[in-house]
Structure formats: C-alpha cells, structure tokens
Image: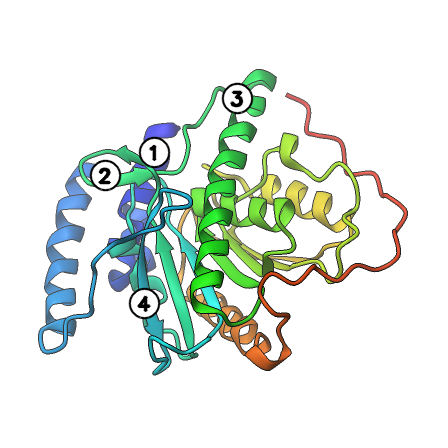
Amino acid sequence: MRGRIAALDGSFGRALALGHYVVRALALDHYMVRTLVLTLCLGIAGAAYADDAPPSELRRDEASGLQYLEVLTGDAAAGDAVPIVVGLHGLGDHPESFRLLLDDLPAKARVIFPRGPMPHGDDGFSWFDFQPDDDEGAAALGQEVKGAAERVAQMINALKKAHGGPDRVVVCGFSQGGILSFELAALHPELVAEAIPVSGYLPSPLWPAERPKLRPLPKVLALHGEADRLIPLQWASWTVEALRSNGYDITLRSWPNVSHALSPEMRAALIAEVVSAVEALSPHDAEKPGAPPKKDAAAAPAEAPSPPAR
C-alpha cells in the first residue's frame, strides 16, 4: 500500500496538466506511465512558460528549517499584505510540480508551497513515514503527522511576521498534504481560516480531545473520491464526524468513480473554495499579527466518535 501511495502522490503534480485519467492510470503501472507523464508534462510546461518562465527558486524558512516555493497570484505585488495560501504536496511529490494546481489562482494571494523534509524516491519528498495498520502504528503515525504540522505552523508564523496581512491562512493539500491540512486545522485553529484537504484524513490519535474554546473555528471542506482504496472515503467520514462533534464547520464532498486522485470537477471545487476563502480574508477585516485570538465563553465538550475497530 505504501508503494502505491508513493506512485500516485509522486506524479500527482506532474499529471495535473494531463487530467484525471492519467492520474488514475498511474495505479496500473507507475514506472511506465511516470515516463510518459514526465515527457508530456515537460512539453506542456515548456510551451506554457517559454516566453515568461515563472521563478521556481526555493527559499528557506529558518524557524522551521523547511524550504518552500512562493508564487504571487492575481496580480499581487511582492510588498502587498495579501492572504497566504499554503499548498501541501503528497508523498513523493515536490513544490515545483504541485504548484501547477494553484499558481494560476484568480485571486490576490501569496501562495506558499513548502517541501516535505524527507527525500523520497528519485526526486520527491515526504512529510512523514507511514506506519503499520495497528494501534501502535497509529500512535506513531499521529506523532509524525503532529511533528510535521508543527513545522508548517512555525513557517506560517514566520511568513505572517515577514509579510503581514490577515492573521489566519488558508491551507490545502493532497493525500499526505490533505492529512496535514486536517491536522493544522485541529492543532492550530488560531492559524487557519479554512482548510481544504483532498484525499486525506486525520488519524484517530489526533482527533481533538475536547471542544476548542477559540472562535471562530476554521472552516473545513474535505474533497474525496468515492473509489479511493488508498485512503478510503470512510476514513475521511470518521474525521469529519470527529471534528464536527467538536464544533467545527465541516463539510465532506465526494465524487463517484474517482480513486486516489483529483478529477477536473474536484480541482474546480478546490479552486473555487480557495478563492472564496481568500476573498473573505481581506486585510482590513483581519486581526493584527501577534494579537491574542478572540475567545468566547467555554462551550460544553462533546464526545468524539470512537475510533474504528481494528
């Protein structure tokens, strides 16, 4: 299973220009299709950017140690205090290819594509290691996911301090990036205005133990393929119920006949939601960076659903 996730995630960004069917084909023969995908995507990318190649130099955040790619969208200028969008790639992918998902975003934003800290495969990266499917493995996976999310949170705080703008950010990601998007909303609700995880879930050890007092909690829109056998839709459903029971405004949208992939319809839904979230984060409505988060009266804790039987 781990190898199949790597095969799909690693070529995800490169396959975006080719559409949903190439991504689904990757499950059949990763190495054969990977060569085809790379060849065709390089040609498409070369044609698209031949006259005006976008910058692709990775920067380094000293606080977290993460490297990242920054893309300004919607005619935003480098000095503008615009909303920050964080795009998190999947296993075996990297920012230079994952940027194809959002670098034409029709909204003024500073889009940040961090790179996973661990090399994976020939030229990809990973955010954490997958663990055995048992209680001990779930606990270990939870710790790794939490550690990766903390590093992304450190990077977000550093970027907010450097660039200003809204006090909360928009996060989205695919597969491992979807897992991290869920975890950032659960672990650091004060940093996240909205999370849009794609083909992700939250391991049960990371479900909130009590209802957060912070208001408003992040909005969450989860996108998932109903035919996903790598991260089944049911796992996302359990995650949604766990967060909803703790006060989150969370919705799960699913698409039939879509496996561990992003169909054109799902990508359109993702971009539309990112644009809506960015437009809601106009700088004059945002809290100043560093200001204490707003809290309301403590709410009675709600019990989260029990973890699935193993």
Task: Return the residue nearer the eye: 301 or 303.
Answer: 301
**Height in image: 9 above or below 136?**
below
Q: Which mark is residue 133?
A: 3
Quadrant containing the N terminus is: top left
| Horizontal and vertical percent position of residue 175 | 44, 45
Task: Give neighbour class at mark 4: few <14, some 14-19, many 20+ (Cα, 10 Å).
Answer: many
For badge 2, the amino acid type reads His
For marks 3 and 4, the one nearer the N-term is 4
Report how far apart the C-alphas of labels 4 and 2 lie in the structure.
29 Å
Discs 2, 3 touching: Cβ within 8 Å: no
* Residue under numbered circle 2: 30
Residue position marked by numbered label 1 in the rendering: 4
Residue at x-position 52% and y-position 41%:
150
Of 32 and 191, the residue lying toward us: 191
The x, y position of residue 113, in whole percent, is 36, 56
Image position, residue 242 (x, y; %): 72, 43
Callout 1–callout 4 Cβ contact below 8 Å: no
Amino acid marked by disc 1: Arg
What is the CA distance from the residue labelled 3 to the residue labelled 1? 15 Å
The answer to whether 52 appears left or right of 172 in the picture is left
Above or below 165: residue 98 = above
Q: Residue 212 vs residue 260: left or right?
A: right
Which residue is located at x 44 percent, y 42 percent? 176
Name the residue beneath numbered marker 4.
Answer: 71
Callout 4–callout 2 Cβ contact below 8 Å = no
CA gap between label 3 and label 4 equals 37 Å
> Is there any visible trace of residue 199 in the rendered image?
no
| Residue 168 visible in the displayed image | yes
Q: Where is residue 238 in the image (x, y as percent from the top left)?
A: 67, 41
Question: Whole-Å distance between the Cαs marked 1 and 4?
Answer: 30 Å
Quadrant in which residue 91 is drawn = top left
- Which residue shows up at 43% across the image and 63% down it? 162
